[in-house]
Amino acid sequence: MKIETVLKEFKEKVCEQISIESEGLNRYIVNTPFKFDDGDHLVIVLKNENNKWALTDEAHTFMHLSYMLDVKDLEYGTRKSIIDDTLKMFSVFEIDGELKLQIPNDEFGNALYSYIQALLKITDITYLSRERAKSTFIEDFRHYFTKRFEQYKPEFEWTPEKDIQKKYVVDCKLEVNGKIYLVFALQNDLSVARATIDLLTFEKWNLKFNSIGIYEEPKTIQDDLKDKLTDVVVKQYTSLSEDNEDRIYNYITSQI
Amino acid sequence: MAKIVIQRVSYLGVILADRVIDSLISEEKHIDKQLTVADIKFKYERGHRRYDKEITGENKSNFILKIRQNEKNPLDFSVILAYRMANSNKVIRIRRYNGKSHNHTNCLEKTQIKNTFHIHYATERYQVNGFQEDGYAQVTDRYSDLDGALKCMMTDCHFTFNQAVIN
């Protein structure tokens, strides 16, 4: 098919503001008005390889996402499900970070339409990370302890034996080198207040443990609640960032 | 230390005022030696290589240097200086030096940059209007590869080294 015909189909099926530029052999840059939310336009390339046309981002999309979030976070949980479902829905496949759509039966216009929808859905992942929606923080918390402390068999939503009615729940309990660690995921005012009450109760019961609090975003918590928790919790971390993941692991495993 | 003007916009939203951004850019950032691409041990991930380095500025501000480069297209790269807000997991990109791989539109000014090297700047006005902090960009001819972009960033953002200060 002639490239002028391809362009005409792109304009008809998607929008008038599409243009194509040749850049290399059998390779065309497809300029569209669709953007990431920082104003950079999506990278879309029309390529002919082995007599087959395909649309590709040449691995730009995931690289661009990595400016705003840790690409490793896309490999599990809610974010991975969204990406996998999106790729399946729009017949896009991923090879080593490159998102590709083979164009069937010269249906260039329909293919571009689907491809753009897929890229835009995937870029929406940044809203999950930036706002740290409830589902992803707790997921991230559990994923971290499950993976990093696998050998110590972490228990989630743990309650002590004495708590028959299971009123005082701990997000994660670990036993490492003979010491008990009670770890709290501090998402909001309520979870901070609950952690404080739990720790005060366990103190009253003379339980022996070390306590750790990990905030999702400390700035969103009322100061007086943070102050009260500070009096009873042993160690606090302001986030579950990559660096803090190492610090938490080192802190727990190096205690004798 | 520069006082940060914070205006709560949404659940986790914060805004940096222009004078604070300027102050963060001007804050001296000391590293052992001047970085070049040849010196960097990149990690490889999903079609690109990446490098991240935490740096503490002279006024104890926390910065992150992020470098990304597409394995398929070496002109598709980004050198980012980000600021991590104190006691927060919020990271704000204050300067971004991009390669030549895509168009860019400045959403407020409605101007377009066509597939050439450009620099993104964090601005108060973009944040206030609900756009990404570094949504504003300008064309540049100061570099033509990743090494050049890295050098420009270190010059513009007041990096210093044990041996010399770049002017």
Image (spheres, coloured by chain):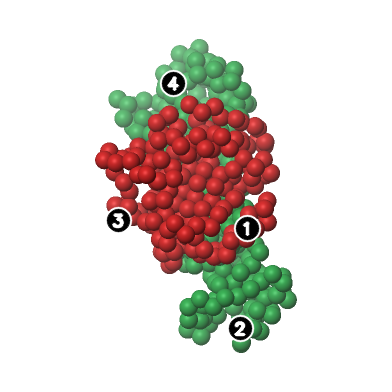
> Which is more toward the observer, A3 or A187?
A3
Label 2 SS: helix
- Answer yes or no: is residue B84 visible: no
Whole-number angstrom distance, CA of label 1 to CA of label 2: 26 Å
Q: Mark 1 vs mark 4: same chain? A: no
Query: Which residue appears at 35% of the width and 44% of the height?
Result: B166
Q: Mark 1 vs mark 3: same chain? A: yes
Horizontally, is A37 left or right of B117 in the view?
right
Q: Mark 4 vs mark 2: same chain? A: yes
Whole-number angstrom distance, CA of label 1 to CA of label 4: 49 Å
Name the amino acid, label 1: Thr
| Residue B159 image point, x, y percent | 38, 41
Whole-number angstrom distance, CA of label 4 to CA of label 2: 66 Å
| Residue A150 image point, x, y percent | 40, 41
Name the amino acid, label 4: Val
> Which is more toward the observer, A57 or A145?
A57
Which residue, given by chain and number where applicable, does mark 3 sit on? B38
Name the amino acid, label 2: Ile
Which residue, given by chain and number where applicable, does mark 2 sit on? A3
Name the amino acid, label 3: Ala
Q: Which mark is residue B114?
A: none
Chain to which mark 4 belongs:
A
